[in-house]
Amino acid sequence: MKTNQRSAMTRLGAALAAGALLFAVTAAPPLGGVAVKTAQAKEYGSEAIAKSVLFSVFYLPAKVFYAAFGAATAGLAYGFTLGDEEATNKIWVSAVEGSYIITPAMAEGDEKVRFQGP
């Protein structure tokens, strides 16, 4: 190799190493100082995961249809009420917010499924 190629390869290697080091430092959790509580997640088995996938296959399209129809209805309500945001937001929040997939916790009954928003 020529000297210019070696120099370029060395600079590239150094840049990649510096990028990897920067990523490792920023992605790593803090090592001490401030006490941070972490949530204890319940481990779910393959049966709960399989249930959540199976239920989501049917639930997700229904929720997306409901949300799209609700969003369109909210748009119409905004026009028909001449810009009444309170009425529009009630329809929007009810239709668009909520659960879009069934998690293993929901499949096991540990969490509620929210088809509609609050």
Image (cartoon, rainbow, N blue to C red):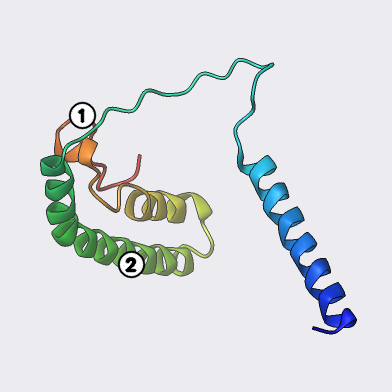
Check the image and report above or below for 36 versus 74: above
List x then y, in percent, for residue 20. Answer: 67, 53
Check the image and report above or below for 5 versus 10: below
Residue at horizontal 21%, vertical 40%? 104
- Which element is circle 2 on? helix
Which marked residue is nearer to the observer: mark 2 or mark 1? 1
List x then y, in percent, for residue 12. Answer: 77, 69
List x then y, in percent, for residue 22. Answer: 72, 48
Name the side, left or right, on which 12 lies relative to 34.
right
On the image, which quarter does residue 75 sit in? bottom left
- The residue at which mark 2 appears reads as 68
Question: In the rendered image, which quarter contains the N terminus?
Answer: bottom right
Residue at horizontal 40%, vertical 50%? 93
- The residue type indicated by label 2 comes to Ala
The reply to whether the C-beta atoms of the residues labelled 2 and 1 are less than 8 Å apart is no
Q: Which mark is residue 52?
A: none
- Which element is circle 1 on? loop
- The residue type indicated by label 1 comes to Asp
Q: Looking at the picture, tell me which residue is in the foreground, 36 or 25.
A: 25
List x then y, in percent, for residue 79. Answer: 47, 69
- The residue at which mark 1 appears reads as 110
Badge 2: residue crowd in 10 Å (few <14, some 14–19, many ≥20): some
Name the side, left or right, on which 73 lies relative to 47.
right
Question: In the rendered image, which quarter contains the C terminus?
Answer: top left
Q: CA distance from mark 2 to mark 1?
A: 28 Å
On the image, which quarter does residue 53 sit in? bottom left
Q: Looking at the picture, tell me which residue is in the foreground, 15 or 5.
A: 5
